[in-house]
Amino acid sequence: MGARTDEDMDEDDVFKALADASRRRLLDGLNARNGQTLRELCAGLDMTRQSVSKHLAVLEAAGLVTAMRRGREKLHYLDAAPINAIADRWMSRYDRHRARALADLKTALEQAPMTASEFVYTTYINTTPERLWQALTDPAFTRGYWGVSFETDWKPGSTITWHEEGATTADPEQVVLEADPGRRLSYTWHTFTPEWAKSVGVDEETRRRLMAEPRSTVTFDIEPAGETVKLTVVHRAGEALLDMSRHGWPHVLSGLKTLLETGAPLPSV
C-alpha cells in the first residue's frame, strides 16, 4: 500500500467530524444562521457548554468551522472549503448516483439560507503573509486570478476605483475601511453600474436588485499557520449579492491559491 497523503489525512478529519450527529446539528445551526457565539449555539441543544466547546474544537480542526473574534465575542462560522475539496475530488471519479449523498451535503453546507447576511470562506495557502497581502492588493496579481484590478493607495478612508472586464467603476462610497499589511484588509464593494453589468453579463433586473441592497463589505483576515497562511474571507452583503458570492468567491480564492503556490493562473473551465 502507498503512503497516505496530506490530502487523505485532511479528508479523514472531515469525515470523522461529520460522523457525529451532535456535530452535524451544530453545522445545521450555523447553516441556519452563520456567525453565532458559543452561548447561542448551546441554546436548544441537549448538551453542556463544555460538550459543545469540544465538538466545535473538532469541527475547527477539520476546517468545517472558523472562529473569529468580534470585540469580546467569539463568533463561529460555517466554512464550505473542506466540503468543496472533497466533492471536487470524489465527484470527478464516480458517477452522479454514487456521489449523490456527498453532493447533497456539499450543497447544504455551501448554500446559506436567505436570511444569512455573511459569506465566510477559509483557505490555507503555502505562502507568506507579505506575499498574500501583495496578491490581494497588487493589480499585477489580482488581474491574474480575479480579472479585477484596484486603483487606490490602500490607506483607510481612500477611495477605490475598480477595473473589471473593460469597465471602470468609481464612486465616493467605494473606500478602504481597514488596511493592516500582512494581517487584515477590508473595503466596501463596488457600485453596480450599467457599464459594469454589461461588461460581466448581468441583466438589468438583477442589477436593480443589487442596487436596492445596502453597500456590502469584504474583509480578509491573514494569519500565519505553520508553514502556510490562513486566509479567512468574510463578505457581508444583501441577499442578491450573497447568492452571487457563494458561487464567485470559491473560484476566486482557488485561483489565488493556485497562483501563489504554482506561479500559474487557474486553468479556464
Image (cartoon, rainbow, N blue to C red):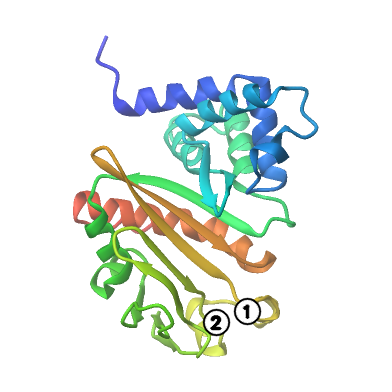
Q: Residues within 10 Å of mark 1 (few under 14, many from 20)?
A: few
Asked whether the viewer can see residue 163, the reply is yes
Say if 210 sits above or below 7 in the image.
below
Give above or below for 67 relative to 210.
above
Upstream in the sequence, badge 2 or badge 1? 2
Q: Is residue 176 above or below residue 114?
A: below
**Residue wearing tag 1:** 203
Circles 2 and 1: CB atoms closer than 8 Å = yes
Say if residue 62 shows up in the picture: no
Q: Position of residue 65 (x, y in %)?
A: 54, 38
Residue position marked by numbered label 2 in the rendering:
197
**Which is more toward the observer, 97 or 61?**
61
Indicate which disc residue 266 carries. Answer: none
Q: Amino acid at mark 1?
A: Asp
In the image, taking residue 114 as reference, residue 142 lies left or right, namely left
* Residue 169 x %, y %: 46, 87
Residue 19 falls left or right of residue 129: right
User: Residue 198: where, in percent of width, then height?
Assistant: 53, 84
Q: What secondary structure is found at the residue carrying circle 2?
A: helix
Secondary element at tag 1: loop
User: Which quadrant does the N terminus fall into?
Assistant: top left
* Residue type of the residue flagged with mark 2: Ala
Q: Residue at x 64, y 80 (%)?
A: 207
The quarter of the picture where the C terminus appears is: bottom left
Q: Give the x, y percent position of residue 118.
A: 61, 57
Sort mark 2 into few (<14), some (14-19) or many (20+) by Cα contacts within 10 Å: some
Front residue of 23 and 53: 53
In the displayed orientation, state which residue is furthest to the front.
Answer: 72
Q: Which residue is at the far left?
A: 263
Q: Quadrant of residue 134?
A: bottom left
Which residue is found at the position 38% from the left and 52% from the top? Answer: 254
